[in-house]
Image (cartoon, rainbow, N blue to C red):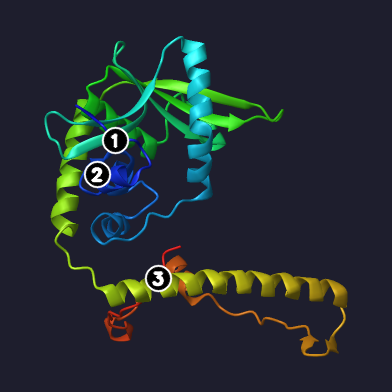
Amino acid sequence: MKINLNQGTQAWLEYRREKFNASETPDIMGVGFNKPYQLAQIKFGGVEQYQSRAMADGIKYEPLIRQKIEIDTGLKFEPCVIQSDDDPRFSASLDGYNEKENLIIEIKFSKNEAFQIHEKGEPSINYYYQIQHQLMVTGAKKCLFVAGYIDNGFQLEYKSCEVLPEPKIWDKIQKAWIDFENDYKNEIIDAEFMDISTELSELNEKAKEIEAKIKELKDRALIKANGRECKVANITIYKTTRKGGYDYAKFIKDQKIEIPSGYKKADSDFWAVRINS
């Protein structure tokens, strides 16, 4: 069933929060750009979806790529939103649908994906799950997967391949979405925890920039010193020698020595915080 919504509008965004969307399926299958808990924060916790440069480029080039496809195939493809007749929780926002031919298209702007199509004749696994979700929702007979890119002559080109329905994959997608909703929808998202997470992420990005700049300046200082120990203002250039040692673990392994249990340290648990880049 077609839904009367324009993609990119606020109404469309609100609609998507309540649906199992094709573009999110790679996330819940563990091969997307977000971890499942990150997707849960977006869908159920009010966290804004980050728009990467690649996503912005995709929005920019999608109409141009679709126009080239329509000229080359002689078919018209209408962007639209489709909701499953079998289960209205499942939805797909299509880059193009030709109802007469029962054919859908999925468009990406990615030189890497164009190379993947050229070399393998199929999409990467994350886009494959997205396409299978679309085929499941629409009942289309196939999807034309298209990856656009700018060639060495600064012209917009594309590579394409056909993807056929795989109902066995649909079963996996449906189960994964139901498990995702059961695991995350009713989980209480602590506002203070979210603030801590956001601030840590921002500080981590700044720290990485600072560390990269420090390394760059140290490398430049070593080049300027040209193999001499010296002191210039607040920095000192000096030579260090790392003493050799014994690789006891390798020795024990190579000699097939079994260490008595009295010398084995007991396992211990600890908690840590990992900042996901």
- Residue 233 in which image quadrant: bottom right
Please name the amino acid that badge 1 sits on: Leu
Kind of residue indicated by mark 3: Thr
N-term mark: 2 or 3: 2
Query: Which residue position holds label 3?
Result: 198
Cβ–Cβ under 8 Å for marks 2 and 1:
yes
**Which corner quadrant of the image does residue 264 belong to?**
bottom left
In the image, taking residue 91 as reference, residue 227 lies left or right, namely right
Q: Residue at x 84, y 87 (%)?
A: 232
Up/down of 201 relative to 262, above or below:
above
Alpha carbon separation for disc pair 2 and 3:
26 Å
- Spatial CA distance of label 2 from label 1 is 9 Å
Task: Please tell me which residue is depicted at 30% across the width and 42% down the height of the picture.
Answer: 12
Estimate the x, y position of residue 171 in percent, counting from the top left.
Answer: 17, 34
| Residue 202 rendering spot, x and y as whole percentages | 48, 71
The answer for how far apart the CA atoms under marks 3 and 1 are is 32 Å
- Residue 89 coordinates in the image, percent (x, y): 16, 40
For disc 1, the neighbor class at 10 Å (few under 14, some 14 to 19, many from 20) is some
